[in-house]
Amino acid sequence: MKITLRKGAGGFEAYVPKKDLEEAVVAAERPDLWGGWIELANGWRFDLPALAADTRLPITVDARRTSTGEG
């Protein structure tokens, strides 16, 4: 699933165009995001690709959704 990541005033934010959803990133496996999972405020969790720590934002990446936040 394609998601766009950017840095906002309160931290990282993610936009999922397919669902027209914009949420804050509330948890991340790695501080630089890349190569680990992130969790959005609605409970969705995504595995991100391994990219360089200095990758410029905003960027659209293919991420795999691993959780819908339900149960």
Image (cartoon, rainbow, N blue to C red):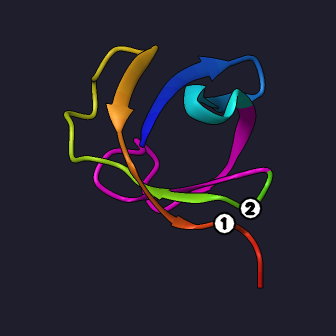
Marks 1/2: CA–CA distance: 6 Å
The residue wearing badge 2 is: 43
- In the rendered image, residue 54, in percent from the top left (x then y), is placed at 27, 24
SS under mark 1: loop
The number of numbered badges drawn on the structure is 2
**Circle 1 residues within 10 Å: few <14, some 14–19, many ≥20:** few
Residue 12: say if magenta: no
- Number of the front mark, 1 or 2: 1
Residues in magenta? Answer: 22-41
Q: Residue 52 placed where, x, y %? A: 19, 33
Name the residue at the bottom extreme: 71
> Is 27 left or right of 32, judged from the image as shown?
right
Tell me whether the residue at label 1 lies in contact with that at label 2, contact meaning CB atoms closer than 8 angstroms: yes
- Position of residue 32 in the picture relative to residue 50 (left or right): right
Element at label 2: loop
Q: Quadrant location of residue 30?
A: bottom left
On the image, numbered disc 1 is attached to which residue?
68
| Picture layout, residue 6 above or below residue 18 | above
Residue at horizontal 46%, vertical 14%?
58
> Which quarter of the image is occupied by the C terminus?
bottom right
Query: The N terminus is located in which quarter?
Result: top left
Identity of the amino acid at label 2? Gly
> Is residue 32 covered in magenta?
yes
Question: Given the image, on which type of amino acid does mark 1 rest?
Answer: Thr
